[in-house]
């Protein structure tokens, strides 16, 4: 068992370290998973074991393949939508309109609000990043802001004050309902306070980090594949924003019946409407489709590689013992639940994974103790969105590397401050407020 713990903790630490170093995740993730498997006593190949016993190859590849099978259509259409927004000039048109209305000094605010609206409207976090990035790169370029802060800006608007808030259609807010018999609006009074705290504090912190970088001489760095900001003719900004609205509305209204498959219809509607409305402004539509497809393959490959690591980690004896220990923490149930879900989310690299693993054990135990289910729902939802955003998290890797073409060394520290540190403080604030009886 000791070796299994060494393998689990060491493998995770090694994955985080190598991710920060910028090594290829399709190589390092399975190697780190193999490290976990060997020290945990798991067989490498299914042919060397009997029955349905866990093996490195089966667990890694099954988790890898399941993720690709579940999410590839959304990744593909999301990447294509982002590319055609840029190639048609629609992203630049919207960004110039925003600059004209809000002012160049509020470029960051515009990106955060765009991400927040799409996320709270039910659009997947990955798709939000693909969709808003073209506008973000244009706004950062016009405002001459250091581009390494784009991933942090996208993530702040998507995974902090919206993803786990009351009423959010994201799965991190819906998973607890099944186990606690609550509603998506559970603990809404505390949720509003925490969301306002995260939004205002996070925006202040993000602006402060960007300002400090500018004072140190950092500016926007031009790249060959950046959107053309010359005097090219741009489409009408209102017609350019229509496809984004279509994605939002279709996702929102179809979510109840099609669930995540609603994104396929929504994104397809966005691509088709964009082509119909602004087809004469495309520079190279075929090339945009090609680049979007390539980007989707890279993004989902990197993410699935990390998911595969989680599949092996969950099969280790140390992980099972860790879950048992985390879900039996003495003291306040809200504190215990928050710690358990957050730590498990960190080990699996997934906020939803942390909830799905912990809640079947936590929920009946804590409900029998008389814990308020709404308080537990909101605390667990908020805390799940903290340690899940460590460097190896699939969304983090996809946003930094595949979408923004940045490195972890340059982009992660600002992103980690806003998506790990800030939500941890938000979870503590929620626990304090619930402890004093607010919303109960």
Image (spheres, helix red, strand yellow):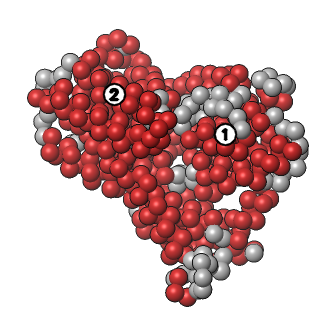
Q: How far apart are marks 1 and 2 (CA)?
A: 28 Å
Q: Is mark 1 on a helix, strand or loop?
A: helix
**Residue 128 seen in render:** yes
Residue at image position (23%, 48%) is 291
**Is 372 situated left or right of 389 in this image?**
right
Precedes in sequence: disc 1 or disc 2: 1
**Is 431 situated left or right of 211 in this image?**
right
**Residue 386 vertical position relative to residue 67 in the rendered view, above or below:** above
Residue at image position (43%, 68%) is 27
The residue pinned by badge 1 equals 177
On residue 299, which mark appears?
none
Rate crowding at label 2 as few (under 14), some (14 to 19) or many (20 or more) other CA atoms within 10 Å: some
Rate crowding at label 1 as few (under 14), some (14 to 19) or many (20 or more) other CA atoms within 10 Å: some
Residue at image position (56%, 65%) is 311
Residue 75 position, x and y percent, is 36, 48
Residue 335 position, x and y percent, is 80, 42
Q: What element carries label 2?
A: helix
In the image, 114 versus 418, the foreground residue is: 114
**Is 92 situated left or right of 184 in this image?**
left
Labelled pair 1, 2 in contact (Cβ < 8 Å): no
In the image, 354 versus 52, the foreground residue is: 52
Q: Quadrant of the N terminus?
A: bottom right
Residue 305 position, x and y percent, is 46, 62
In the image, 191 versus 101, the foreground residue is: 191
**Residue 232 vertical position relative to residue 377 in the rendered view, above or below:** above
Q: Quadrant of the C terminus?
A: top right
In the image, 332 versus 12, the foreground residue is: 332
The residue pinned by badge 2 equals 246
**Residue 17 seen in render:** no
**Residue 103 vertical position relative to residue 324 in the rendered view, above or below:** above
Residue 99: quadrant of the picture: top left
Residue 42 position, x and y percent, is 62, 79
């Amino acid at each position: 068992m000791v070796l299994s713990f060494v393998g689990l903790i060491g493998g995770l630490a090694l994955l985080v370290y190598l991710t920060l170093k910028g090594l290829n995740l399709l190589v390092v993730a399975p190697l780190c998973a193999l490290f976990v498997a060997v020290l945990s006593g798991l067989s490498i190949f299914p042919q060397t074991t009997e029955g349905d016993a866990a093996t490195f190859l089966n667990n890694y590849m099954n988790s890898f393949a399941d993720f690709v099978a579940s999410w590839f259509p959304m990744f593909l259409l999301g990447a294509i939508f982002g590319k055609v927004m840029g190639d048609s000039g629609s992203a630049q048109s919207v960004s110039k309109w925003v600059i004209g209305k809000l002012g160049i000094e509020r470029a960051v605010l515009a990106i955060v609000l765009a991400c927040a609206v799409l996320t709270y409207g039910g659009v997947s976090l990955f798709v939000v990043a693909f969709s808003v990035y073209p506008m973000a790169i244009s706004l950062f370029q016009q405002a001459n802001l250091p581009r390494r802060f784009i991933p942090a800006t996208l993530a702040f608007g998507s995974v902090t004050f919206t993803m786990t808030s009351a009423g959010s259609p994201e799965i991190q807010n819906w998973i607890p309902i099944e186990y606690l018999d609550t509603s998506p609006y559970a603990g809404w009074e505390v949720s509003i306070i925490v969301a306002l705290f995260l939004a205002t504090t996070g925006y202040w912190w993000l602006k402060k980090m960007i300002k400090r970088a500018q004072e140190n001489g950092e500016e926007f760095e031009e790249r060959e594949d950046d959107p053309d900001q010359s005097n090219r003719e741009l489409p009408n900004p209102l017609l350019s924003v229509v496809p984004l609205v279509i994605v939002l509305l279709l996702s929102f209204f179809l979510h109840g019946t099609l669930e995540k498959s609603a994104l396929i219809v929504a994104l397809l509607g966005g691509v088709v409407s964009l082509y119909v409305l602004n087809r004469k402004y495309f520079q190279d539509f075929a090339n945009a489709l090609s680049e979007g497809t390539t980007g989707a393959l890279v993004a989902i490959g990197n993410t699935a590689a990390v998911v595969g690591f989680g599949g092996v980690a969950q099969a280790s004896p140390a992980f099972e013992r860790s879950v048992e220990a985390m879900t039996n923490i003495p003291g306040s149930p809200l504190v215990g639940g928050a710690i358990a879900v957050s730590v498990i989310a960190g080990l699996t690299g997934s906020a939803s994974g942390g909830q799905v693993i912990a809640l079947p054990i936590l929920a009946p135990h804590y409900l029998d103790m008389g814990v308020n289910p709404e308080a537990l729902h909101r605390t667990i939802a908020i805390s799940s969105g903290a340690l899940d955003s460590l460097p190896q998290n699939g969304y983090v890797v996809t946003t930094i590397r595949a979408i923004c073409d940045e490195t972890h060394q340059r982009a992660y520290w600002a992103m980690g401050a806003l998506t790990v540190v800030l939500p941890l403080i938000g979870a503590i604030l929620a626990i304090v407020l619930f402890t004093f009886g607010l919303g109960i």
